[in-house]
């Protein structure tokens, strides 16, 4: 067997292992659970369970990676993933790494099997946590405890998202997994590491002059987006920079999320404490845990929803434990499968690329923000909006190579105001290191964040006078 070409995505390098038996006849690979840019995950049965009297074979998930050459960057990344995952595995809410096997061309990571799939599926397809305070608390505290345990061991995940959280059959127990981008570095210059919806502003780097950032604080930001996913079934913005209209509006209005999402005021307060623009001002995980336990409800009551604007009513209708819209409009699983199949032939990660039905933000708030955006677009060269787009444009597929300040100076473009993304489209990118030199002229740092906010306040006053 010859080695596959290194320029090909790893998932396409792995042949069909269905039915294959590995580890001297111990594990039989039964079917594919998922595929990614770096490998394929199979469900496996243990044909020779050690020390077990049960006649039912144990089940595992086996992640198969193309074996990188020792000493290369890819080889170091694989070694780091294995070591960090093994260290983190002793927590009950971290997916256990049981064994690591290898042959001439592949590495096999033997992991816990989670019959419920990932958290993405539980939220989007099964609506498991919609309007369920008990489950949201239980699950999010488990996630907090797992991440806190990792942080205490000096492991920072850098790719926290629902796709990397796995669930049991009823989705009441969750387990953090996929340590492929984890690091032991407290500070980093690996910008755009992770998935775009979940990146912190400092991880993106644009508005922090591409300075070193704290990986622990960046993980906490990602936890906040996951909490929004659990509560509202959607993402708050595409990209946490002021070039994203929804993020800019969030920065200037403490109650912005209350205008868009069917969330309680107490939930909004918690989210504001997580999404502090300055990393040192962000709530700590122990403090966040206490706040989650203390909250009465994350959701609006039916009466409060009925008294809310159309945006909130439509958002609540899309994310309820009981279907309230036709099943053909809610067949997100079918959409996911079609999109996943369509991406197999490309270089994109064949993960979750999904947008559920959009709601139109036909509200005075949206009109005001649109006018503000038009006035700001001439004042700031850093904005990258398209006022003609009919929906949010994708910020691009996950990159197989590094993203540096030179490669992606403006972030995603094609942002259109009147729609907000539902679901969790995965636009993550690979590690983007700029260490080891300047490598050419970088994009000019954005120093005008607070100038933007000041201008926004002035224009808001003008708009109130124009549109009383």
Image: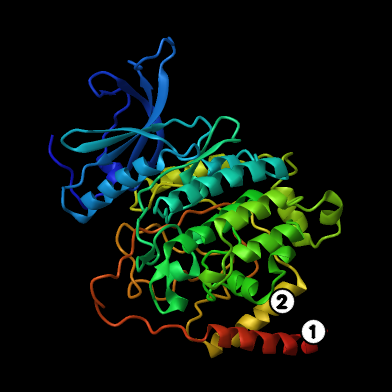
Rendering coords of residue 126 (x, y %): 62, 38
**What is the quadrant of the C terminus in the image?**
bottom right
Pointer 1 residue: 467
Mark 1 → mark 2, Cα distance in angstroms: 10 Å
The answer, for residue 419, to whether it is visible in the render is no
Q: Residue at x 54, y 73 (%)?
A: 278
Query: What label does residue 435 carry, if any?
Result: none
Q: Can residue 420 be seen in this view?
A: yes
Give the residue displayed 59% in from the left and 66% down from the top. Answer: 275
> Which residue has dot 2 on it?
367
Q: Marks 2 and 1: in contact by CB < 8 Å?
A: yes
Image side of residue 364 versus residue 52, left or right: right
Above or below: residue 369 compared with residue 312: below
Quadrant location of the N terminus in the rendered image: top left
Left or right: 288 in relation to 322: left
Q: Which of 436 and 41 is in front in this view?
A: 436
Say which element carries label 1. loop
């Amino acid at each position: 067997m010859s080695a596959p070409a290194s320029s090909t995505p790893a998932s396409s390098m792995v042949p069909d292992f269905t039915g294959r038996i590995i580890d001297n006849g111990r594990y039989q690979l039964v079917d594919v659970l998922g595929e990614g840019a770096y490998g394929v995950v199979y469900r496996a049965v243990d044909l020779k369970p050690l020390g077990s009297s049960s006649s039912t074979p144990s089940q595992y998930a086996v992640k198969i990676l193309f074996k990188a050459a020792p000493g290369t960057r890819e080889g170091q990344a694989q070694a780091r993933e294995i070591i960090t995952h093994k260290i983190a595995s002793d927590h009950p809410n971290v997916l256990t790494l049981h064994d690591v096997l290898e042959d001439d061309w592949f590495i096999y990571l033997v992991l816990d099997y989670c019959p419920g799939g990932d958290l993405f599926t539980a939220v989007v397809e099964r609506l498991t946590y919609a309007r369920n305070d008990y489950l949201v608390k239980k699950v999010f505290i488990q996630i907090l405890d797992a991440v806190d345990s990792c942080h205490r061991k000096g492991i920072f995940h850098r790719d926290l998202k629902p796709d990397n959280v796995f669930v049991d059959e009823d989705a009441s127990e969750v387990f953090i997994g996929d340590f492929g981008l984890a690091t032991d570095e407290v500070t980093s210059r690996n910008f755009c590491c992770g998935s775009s919806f979940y990146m912190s502003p400092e991880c993106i780097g644009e508005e922090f002059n591409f300075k070193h950032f704290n990986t622990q604080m960046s993980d906490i930001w990602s936890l906040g987006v996951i909490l929004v996913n659990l509560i509202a079934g959607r993402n708050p913005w595409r990209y946490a920079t002021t070039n994203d209209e929804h993020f800019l509006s969030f920065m200037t209005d403490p109650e912005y999320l209350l205008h868009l999402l069917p969330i309680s005021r107490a939930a909004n307060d918690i989210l504001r404490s997580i999404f502090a623009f300055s990393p040192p001002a962000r709530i700590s995980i122990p403090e966040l845990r206490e706040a989650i336990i203390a909250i009465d409800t994350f959701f609006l009551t039916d009466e409060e929803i009925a008294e809310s604007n159309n945006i909130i009513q439509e958002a609540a209708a899309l994310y309820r434990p009981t279907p309230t819209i036709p099943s053909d409009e809610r067949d997100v699983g079918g959409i996911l499968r079609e999109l996943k199949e369509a991406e197999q032939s490309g270089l994109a990660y064949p993960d979750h690329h999904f947008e559920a039905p959009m709601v139109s933000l036909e509200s005075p708030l949206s009109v005001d923000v649109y006018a503000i955006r038009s006035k700001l677009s001439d004042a700031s060269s850093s904005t990258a909006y398209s006022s003609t787009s009919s929906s949010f444009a994708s910020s691009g597929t996950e990159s197989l190579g590094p993203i540096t300040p030179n490669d992606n100076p403006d972030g995603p473009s094609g942002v259109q105001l009147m729609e907000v993304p539902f679901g969790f489209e995965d636009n993550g990118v690979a590690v983007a290191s700029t260490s080891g030199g300047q490598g050419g002229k970088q994009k000019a740092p954005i120093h005008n964040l607070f100038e933007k906010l000041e201008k926004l306040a002035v224009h808001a006053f003008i708009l109130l006078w124009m549109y009383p």
